[in-house]
Amino acid sequence: MKNNIINNITNNFYKMQKLFLYRIAIMIFGIFTYLFIWVKKYILYKYHKKLYRNNYIYSEAEIEKLAEEYSLHIEKEKEILSKSISKEEKENRIKKYIDNIKKSTNKYINKEIKSNIEDSAILKNLLENNIFFIYSVIFSLPMYILIYIFSHWYMKYIFERIVMMLFVMFGVIFLVFTILYISPMDSAVNILGQDATKEQIEAFNKSYGLDKSYIEQLFSSLKNIITFNLGKSYVGNEDIFSAIARKFPITLSISFLSLLLAIIIAIPAGVISSIKQYSIFDYVFMLVALIGLSIPNFWIGLILILNFSINLNIFPASFSVHNISSYIMPTIVLGTGLSAAVARMTRASMLEIKSSEFVLTARSKGLNENIVIFRHIFKNALIPIITVIGIQLGSILGGAAVTEKVFNINGIGSYIVDKQFIPDIPVILAGVVYISIVVSIVNLMMDILYAFLDPRIKSDMKNY
């Protein structure tokens, strides 16, 4: 059991050594283990170097013999080619020949030594000692967690995407903060008013750290985000983390309801339209989908409010968390554009797969048409459909500000938009972090879903 564990550890350790970023990571996380590896590596290097030198390094007598042999070679060359070679040129050629032999010998020795003192081989030898095994696991636990993650393709893929997400997040924070910093808008003047005195503006800037340099403010913002201390907004001194935590469930619920509506309507419509291509249903559906994509959300929202809230008084015009009927119109507004995009992609993807040779083969085998449609055509058409759904869902979860404004929804989108005109820098940065995390998580979920739908992608991920 222990030998299998050690073999798995060292095999994955060897693979990670070949990848630069993983090599750096395990070196940092396993520094206490690496100290022993380096010490033993140095001792082995000295031992093997001495051993190989005794076996492969030429003695003075052998070097003299090689020099004499090469000197005879030069004399023969001189005789055959009738070429005049001076004594000085002859000595230089002999010296160069001997130097090349020494260099090639040293190169061979170093290569052989390195092959015999691989870090993974040393680690395996050390881990066979029970005391060192316990010590290494205790003091280098993060390294072994990383090795475990690396050994499972799905965990490795998720871990790498999370690391990439962090880099994207910090890149976006840097970009947005820089834009806000060089923006001509003055937060103090916008909040305190044009009549604010110089002393009041200076006091405001000092209390929120706006009087500091660009670098100081940037690092302060990054530190607050890393420590989950998003701070307080300039307006109302509101705790930003609590505000986002209150507004996120509202945006999330409306987003998923609109997604559910889109899937229920769009996918069946797209499938039927592709199967009945150029039929009346297909033409009508394509027209409706085009209209759904073309009409702005705010216009649909205003029409729904005018007809169903003001004229018919069926649904409330303003959103309320505790009133279920107030969810209907925002869901329809967000779901309309999403349905149109998903349905058009479903139709296009189905038509592309429909003309494939394997579909013709399935039909020639006499399979039921429903089996051909759903098992062979629809299943293989899902990848681009899921891609569109993921992109649309990410944008909706990021905050559909226009729809939220129309229906007076106290969600993430309207919250960020309201604050950007001040500009309330802590709130905007927190919103940017939220959106980047949401979009990255949605993309990660879509990528993982690809693997379950397409065996080819799963195979590629295993070799990732």
Image: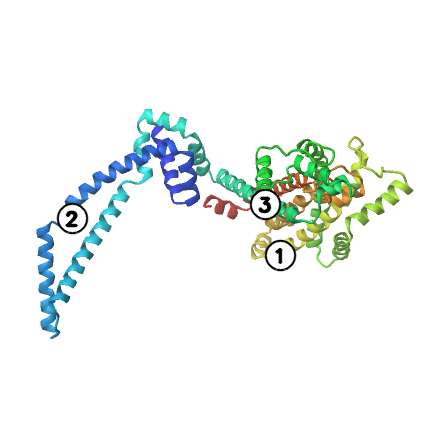
Residue 57's disc is: 2
**How far apart are the two marked residues, 1 and 2, measured between alpha carbons?**
68 Å
Image coordinates for residue 460, horizontal then vertical, percent: 48, 47
The type of residue carrying mark 1 is Glu
109 lies above or below 152 = below
Q: Compare residues 105 and 461 and report the one nearer the observer.
A: 105
Instruction: Give the residue at mark 3.
Output: 174
Q: Answer yes or no: is residue 327 visible.
A: yes
Q: Residues within 10 Å of mark 1 (few under 14, many from 20)?
A: some
Q: Secondary structure at mark 3?
A: helix
Residue 436's disc is: none
Q: Compare residues 174 and 300 and report the one nearer the observer.
A: 174
Image coordinates for residue 88, horizontal then vertical, percent: 13, 66
Image coordinates for residue 398, horizontal then vertical, percent: 67, 42
Q: Quadrant of the N terminus?
A: top left
Q: Earlier in the sequence, mark 1 or mark 2?
A: 2
The type of residue carrying mark 2 is Ile
Q: Secondary structure at mark 1?
A: helix
Q: Earlier in the sequence, mark 2 or mark 3?
A: 2
Instruction: Give the residue at mark 1.
Output: 352
Q: Nearer the viewer, mark 1 or mark 2?
A: 2
**How far apart are the two marked residues, 2 and 3, measured between alpha carbons?**
57 Å
